[in-house]
Image: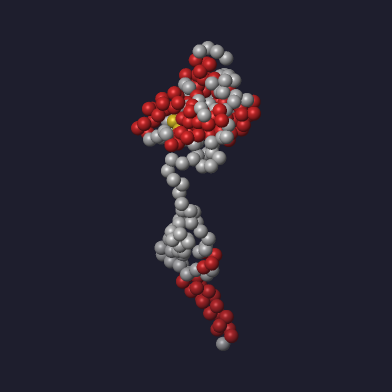
Amino acid sequence: MRNQIIKLIPVVALALILASCGRDPKTPGRIYMPDMTYSNSYKAYVASDVPTPEGNLMSARYPAANTIPYGYIPEDSSIRTNPEYLMSFVAKNHYSHAAEKYQEEYDRAAKEIKDPLPYTDENKAEGKRLYNINCTPCHGPAGEGNGQLIELPGGGDGPYTSRPPSYKTRLPQIKDGNIFYSVSYGRNMMGGYGFQLNVKERWQVIHYIKSLAGISGDDNGAGAVAAETGKK
């Protein structure tokens, strides 16, 4: 009798395993430890089974439209009282990034957005660090458009065949607001970095890429304007 029971153990184990499986990949079948599978904790923006004291089933709500997080805008009064500086921090509420409006908004940014950061070695150094992380795969270490996604180290084309223009060729032709809009929302094959980099970080990257283009300026980073007038 004991030997028969021992022989049945693998069969029973196999039957339990098969019973816990299902044909539907979205259905886990029989769950061995439900408390490990189903968490009792709230999930942000997801309806829960237990209503809050206010009677809603959401653990968190989306912020109201066209709002700015507390502390998002610097306390610096020169930024808060200057619409051209301030626009960098509230641009998401005033600019569209719809494809059909890109050129219109791109041109408007050139007139309305000005670099709010001082042109310092510290900002440029941080911009270089962020550039090496986010931009070199396409634009290359010197901004020549020969990153490893464009041009393979041993020669030949990389997976992306659309080569970005050299910063030395492109940046002197455009305004700071144009650059900020492109970095924030993307341009052509480049995706936007408005979610990866905050406003200050985007301007720090802009300081650095302007230095790669040979554009210098200590008037709040207005190097693009200086280059157009022949000033350094």
Using the image, determine if residue 141 lies above or below residue 228: below
Which residue occupies the extreme top position in the image? 230
Q: How is the image coloured?
A: secondary structure
Tell me where residue 11 appears, x and y as whole percent. 51, 76
Residue 209 locus on image (x, y percent) = 55, 25
Please name the residue shown 50% across and 13% down the image: 229
Q: Residue at x 47, y 61 (%)?
A: 52
Residue drawn where x is 47% and y is 69% of the image: 30
- Residue appearing at x 38%, y 35% in the figure: 98
Q: Nearer the viewer, residue 109 or 208?
A: 109
In the rendered image, residue 177, in percent from the top left (x then y), is placed at 47, 26
Query: Where does the image place residue 157, in percent across and percent down from the top left?
Result: 49, 30
Look at the picture and state if 106 lies above or below 194.
above
The N terminus, quarter of image: bottom right
Tell me, yes or no, if residue 215 can be seen here: yes
* Camera-side residue of 165 and 7: 165
Between 182 and 59, the one nearer to me in the picture: 59
Quarter of the rendering occupied by the C terminus: top right
Res. 57 visible in picture:
no
- Count of residue discs: 0
Q: Is residue 108 left or right of residue 140?
A: left
